[in-house]
Image (spheres, grey):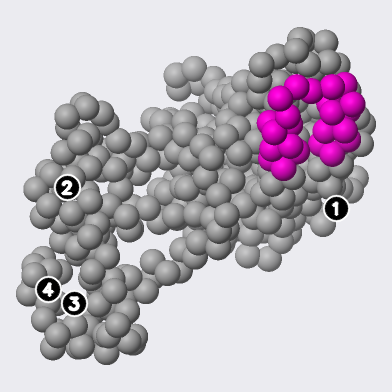
Amino acid sequence: MAFESLSDKLQNVFKTLRGKGRLTEADVHTAMKEVKMALLEADVSFKIVKQFTRTVEERAIGADVLGSLTPGQTVIKIVNEELTRLMGSENTELQLNPGMALTVIMMMGLQGAGKTTTAAKLAGQLKAKGKKPLLVACDVYRPAAIKQLEVNAERVGVPVFTMGDQNSPVDIARAACEHARKNSMNVVLLDTAGRLHVDEDMMEELRRIREAVTVDQTILVVDAMTGQDAVNVAKQFQDQIGISGVILTKLDGDTRGGAALSIRAVTDRPILYVGMGEKLTDLEPFYPDRMAGRILGMGDVLTLIDRVSSEIDEDQARRTERKMRKGELDFNDYLEQMQQMKKMGGLTSLLGMLPGMGQLKGLDQIDDSALKRVESIIYSMTKEERANPSILNPSRKSRIARGAGMDIAEVNRFIKQFEQSKKMMKQMMGNMGKRGGRGLFGGRGGFPF
C-alpha cells in the first residue's frame, strides 16, 4: 500500500510526541530530524524536505505548541496542514469545455507508466458523467499499443479512432478531431507514444500534434513507483511541452510515495487523479487533504464513502438490511457482499481507510485470498443449501469440503462463524435502529463480516 513505510515512520515519531506532557524546542527539533529522514527515504527531494521540515518546526515552536495542553496533537495538526499544502491544498478537477464544445486532451508519458490504460480509465469516467469521449490511437510505434487501446476501450464502452500504424500521429490526431466533430463527440483523448526515457523525437512529435490541433489539456501520466525519477520526468515535460495536470499511477503498489509529495512543488501543476489498481474503474480524483490523512494514519473515510456509493446497489442494500434485521442472511447474501467488497478494492484496502486501522498490528497480514477459500466453500454448495443454511448436516458438509478441496474442519469453522455473524448483525441492526444511525455500506447497517 502506498506510503505504508512513510506512514509507519511518521506515526512512530508522533507516538513519542504524544507521550510527552510538555514539549521543548529540543523535542520538536529531534522529531523534525526523524520526519526529515522518513521523507527522504520516501524519495521526496532534499530541497522540498528541507523547506517542509523548516516550516513545520518554525510553526511548532512559534504557535504556542510548547505550552499547549496537547502539544503532540498540535504538532500533528501542523504536519497535516503542511502536507496538504505541499500537495496542492484542494482537489483540482479536469477542465472541460462546456456543453458540446470539443475538448482535446493529450495524454503523455513514458513507456510503462500505464498511459494507455489510464486513457481508457479516464474515458470511462467521462462517459459516466454524461460526456461523449473518443479515444485516439496515436502510438504507432509500440507493438500492440493500438490493440491494447481497443480492448480497454471496448471494456469501458468508448469508441476508438485508429488509422493503423502507417500514418503519422499528427495526421491521426487531426483526422480524429474532425471525426469527433462530425459525430457529435465532445471529448477527444489522444493516446500518444511514449519512450523508455525523455528524448527529443518524442518531444518534437508532441509539439507537432499541438500545432496541428487545438489541445485544451495536456495530461502527464507518471509511475509513482519510480519515485524521484517521476518528478524529474514531470519537470522535463513541463519545461519542454507544458502540462495541465498529472495522473499518478500504481499508487496502490509498494511505492515510497515521494512523487505525490514532490510533483506539485516542482512543476506547480496539480495532481488530478491517482491510479489505485489495475481495474478500469481504479482511478480516483486526488484530494491532497485526504492523502495527507492516509499518510498520517488518520484514514480516508470520505474516499471510502465515495467508493461505496459508486459500487453499492441501493435496492440490494435495502434487501440485505431487511434480512439482517430479521437474522435471515443466507450464503447468497454473504457471497454478494464479498463480491461487492472486492469491487471496492478488497478487505485490506477498505480497512486501511478507516481512522486508526493503519496503526493496528497485523493489518498488513490480512490476506484477501482467504476470501477465495470462503468463496470455494459457498460455490461447492447446491442452490438449496446456499438459500437454506439450516439444512447443512454432516453428510452435506463432507460433500462440500470435498468439492472445495479442503478439510471438513475448515468448512465447519466457516459455517459456525457465519451463524455467529448473523446473530451479531441482527443485534447490531437492532441497536442501530434505536439510535437511528446509518452505516457506511447502505441502509442503516454495516458489512456482514
Separation of disc 4 and disc 3 at Cα? 6 Å
Nearest-to-viewer mark from 4 and 1: 4
Element under disc 1: loop
Work out how far the residue at label 3 is from the one at label 2, CA to CA, in angstroms.
24 Å
Q: Does label 1 or label 2 sit earlier along the sequence?
A: 1
Residues drawn in magenta: 11-35
**Dominant SS type (magenta):** helix
Distance between the alpha carbons at the discs numbered 1 and 2: 58 Å
Task: Point out which mark residue 381 bears.
Answer: 3
Q: Measure the alpha-carbon separation of dots 4 and 2.
A: 21 Å
Residue underneath mark 4: 385
Which residue corresponds to mark 1?
A: 197
Q: How many marks?
A: 4
- Looking at the image, residue 42 lies above or below residue 212: below
Q: Are marks 4 and 3 in contact (CB under 8 Å)?
A: yes
Q: Is residue 25 a member of the stretch shown in magenta?
A: yes
